Image (tube, grey):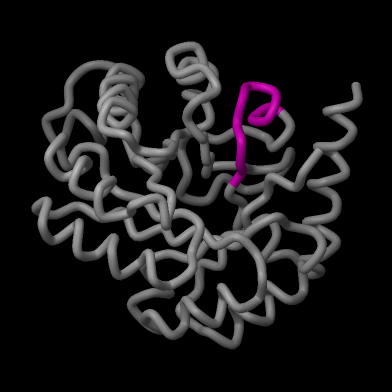
Amino acid sequence: MGNPVFLALDTPDLTRALTLAKAVEGHVGGLKIGLEFFCAQGPEGVRQIVALGKDVFLDLKLHDIPNTVAGAVRSVAQLGVRYVTIHSSGGPAMLEAAVEAAAGRVRLLGVSVLTSLDEVDLAAVGQMGPSGVQVERLAKLAAKCGLDGLIAAPPEIAPLRRIMGREMVLMIPGIRPQGSDKGDQKRVMTPEAAMAAGADFLVIGRPITAAADPAAAAARIIAALKAGAVS
C-alpha cells in the first residue's frame, strides 16, 4: 500500500513545521498546512514546505465571490502544492470559476460540513436536518462542478463512496488512533476503519505532532494500516 497519511502541521511557526516534517520523513505520505500557517508565513513559507519533496495539502477553505476565489486559486497553483480546499457551499459559480482557474495545476477538494460541527451547531446556523443530507448535497454539487475530491468527516466516507464511486478523492480529517484524545473533533474514526470504509488519504495531526516521538507515532499508525490491509 502507498502511504495515505498527511501530517497536519498545525502551527504558525515555520521552524517547528520544518522540524516536524523532517522528523517523520519516511513515515508519512504528505504534509498538510492550513490557515494558521499561511497567515503567519505566507506563500514563501508554503514554498519551503513544498521544497521538502512531499505532496502538500494547503487547507485554506476558500469561500468568496467567484472572481476572488478564481484569483486565489491561480495564485495557489503557482506554489507547487498538490491540493487546496474550497467550500462547496460557495455555490456553482464559485466552484466552476475555481476549477477553470486551477486548470489542472492544483487539485481542488470541496469542504462540506466541518468535522468540528454537529447537529446542534448546524441548527444554530440555520441548517436543519441530518448533517449527512447536507454533506451529500454539497458532494454532488462539487462533483457536478468538476472538483477533484472532497473533505469529509469519517462517518461520511462510506455513504459518499456509494454515491460517488471511486471517481472523487476523499481526504479525511478527524482521524484518531485507538485511545487518542478527540480534541475539538466531534466525528472521528480510527485510521484502519477510515481506510476500510473507502478513504484515500488521512489527515492526522496531534496524535503524531504531540507525541514524545513523532516518528514512532507515525510508524505505529502505518504499521496498523498495513496490518489491516493484510488481514
| Up-down relation of residue 131 to residue 51 (above or below) | above
Q: Judge whether residue 24 is colored magenta.
A: no
| Up-down relation of residue 45 to residue 224 (above or below) | below
Q: In the picture, which quadrant includes the C terminus?
A: top right
Residue furthest toward the front? 103
Write down the quadrant of residue 127 in the picture: top left
Residue furthest toward the top? 162
Q: Judge whether residue 197 is colored magenta.
A: yes
Write down the quadrant of residue 119 in the picture: top left
| Up-down relation of residue 14 to residue 230 (above or below) | below
Chain part drawn in magenta: 193-202
Task: Name the residue: 63% across, 22% down.
Answer: 197
Q: Can you see residue 113?
A: no
Please name whichever residue, 113 or 88, is drawn nearer the observer in this view of the structure. Answer: 88
Task: Name the residue: 48% across, 64% down.
Answer: 81
Residue 96: percent from the left, percent from the top?
20, 41
Residue 9: percent from the left, percent from the top?
56, 67
Residue 151: percent from the left, percent from the top?
43, 39
Q: Image check: 8 left or right of 83? A: right
Write down the quadrant of residue 182 in the picture: top right
Task: Name the residue: 75% across, 47% down.
Answer: 3
Task: Name the residue: 69% across, 45% down.
Answer: 4
Q: Image check: 109 left or right of 134? A: right
Q: In the picture, which quadrant includes the N terminus?
A: top right
Please name whichever residue, 177 or 154, is drawn nearer the observer in this view of the structure. Answer: 154
| Up-down relation of residue 99 to residue 123 (above or below) | below
Residue 86: percent from the left, percent from the top?
30, 49
Q: Can you see residue 143?
A: yes
Q: Image check: 192 left or right of 122? A: right
